[in-house]
Image (cartoon, coloured by chain):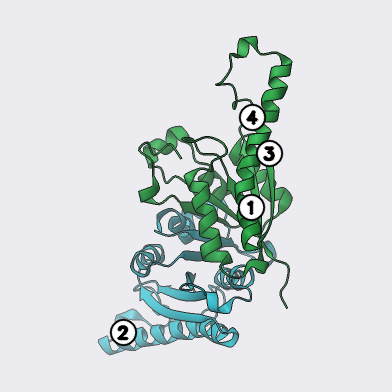
Chain colours: A green, B cyan
Amino acid sequence: MESEPTRIMVAVNESTIKGYPHASISSRGAFEWTLQKIVRSNTSGFKLLFLHVQVADEDGFDDIDSIYASSEDFKNMKRRDKARGLHLLENFVNKCHEIGVLCEAWIKKGDPKEVICHEVKRVQPDLLVVGSRGLGPFQRVFVGTVSEFCAKHAECPVITIKRKADEAPQDPVDD
Amino acid sequence: MESEPTRIMVAVNESTIKGYPHASISSRGAFEWTLQKIVRSNTSGFKLLFLHVQVADEDGFDDIDSIYASSEDFKNMKRRDKARGLHLLENFVNKCHEIGVLCEAWIKKGDPKEVICHEVKRVQPDLLVVGSRGLGPFQRVFVGTVSEFCAKHAECPVITIKRKADEAPQDPVDD
């Protein structure tokens, strides 16, 4: 007899290189590590909770000239953003269905580090898994790292999975 | 068919209140969390590696007057320290035998945070679990925290399990 499944929140984001619907290298890494090292064959013992945070009022503005954007354009952009986010999550959800692991997935808007910690508080997972680019101290100052903030502030145990060295793109800030 | 078991290193130390062979509240917490939330019923999927670090040249001096200690006395102290450390590890190992989880356990001397990171490098576990007293910033400055150092420097993913608030002793520096 097993108790409730262990609920693992996995924070996922899109690739900075390939864009939506592709997941970033580090969030794919964090997901695969969780399956291989924690879930293993015990697919009924875990439930994965995928959270994708979209940075508010920043996405979607590159493509069009915002001066000429009507309110209708903005609505369309928002809709498109959401659709792209869902498409990103779909990859993770499909993989879970395939191997028979329960999961949930949702999108929030805001500052990723703040939103992740807020969602941990609300959802109370047993564990939060976040990927990390493994940036050096110099880059960290300018880029900021979501994983460090979460490890410090999230109200649950946190595992940070560093991107493998051989998977790092030319510019390590990319992901 | 499963691959090699996931190797989880668990750093354990003695209780500051009850002394040997009792484990500290936070290392017991870290161990129990690992069994409940990660290992669950999949006892063949994991191997636990218990590391106990004894602070070098500090333990055992409270009991006798060191001015009168002969070299034979020192040898006896060292032997006694080791026996106490083994007794501490025995509790964890017995529990693993009981539920059928593979394990190893060993003792090292030195500065716990340095030794743990060194052993991670040597043994290459998939995951390191460390307990933490969850001290506030003021206490942390004077006491230092092993878990923070390991989370930053260990060459593998690290989970820090904070002591539950209702298990904290009167003086939170105790454990």
Label 3 or label 4, whichever comes before in sequence order:
4
Q: Secondary structure at mark 3?
A: strand
Subunit that carries the residue with mark 4: A
Q: CB under 8 Å between callouts 1 and 2? A: no
**Label 3 neighbour load within 10 Å: few <14, some 14-19, many 20+:** some
For disc 3, the marked residue is A108
Q: CB under 8 Å between callouts 3 and 1? A: no
Q: CB under 8 Å between callouts 4 and 1? A: no
Marks 3 and 4 on same chain: yes
Residue A94 tag number: 1
The x, y position of residue B149, in whole percent, is 43, 56
Q: Secondary structure at mark 4?
A: loop
| Residue type (three-letter) at the residue carrying disc 2 | Phe
- In front of the other: label 4 or label 2? 4
Label 3 or label 1, whichever comes before in sequence order:
1
Report whether A145 appears left or right of A95.
left
| Residue type (three-letter) at the residue carrying disc 1 | Asn
Q: Quadrant of residue B85?
A: bottom left
Q: Is residue A82 above or below residue B13?
A: above
The x, y position of residue B129, in whole percent, is 51, 65
**Label 4 neighbour load within 10 Å: few <14, some 14-19, many 20+:** few
Q: CA distance from mark 2 to mark 3?
A: 62 Å
Q: Quadrant of residue A142?
A: top left
Which residue appears at 35% of the width and 64% of the height? B121
- In front of the other: label 3 or label 1? 1
Q: CA distance from mark 4 to mark 1?
A: 26 Å
Residue A56 tag number: 4
Label 4 or label 1, whichever comes before in sequence order:
4
- In front of the other: label 4 or label 1? 1
Subunit that carries the residue with mark 3: A
| Residue type (three-letter) at the residue carrying disc 3 | Lys
Report whether A170 appears left or right of A90.
left
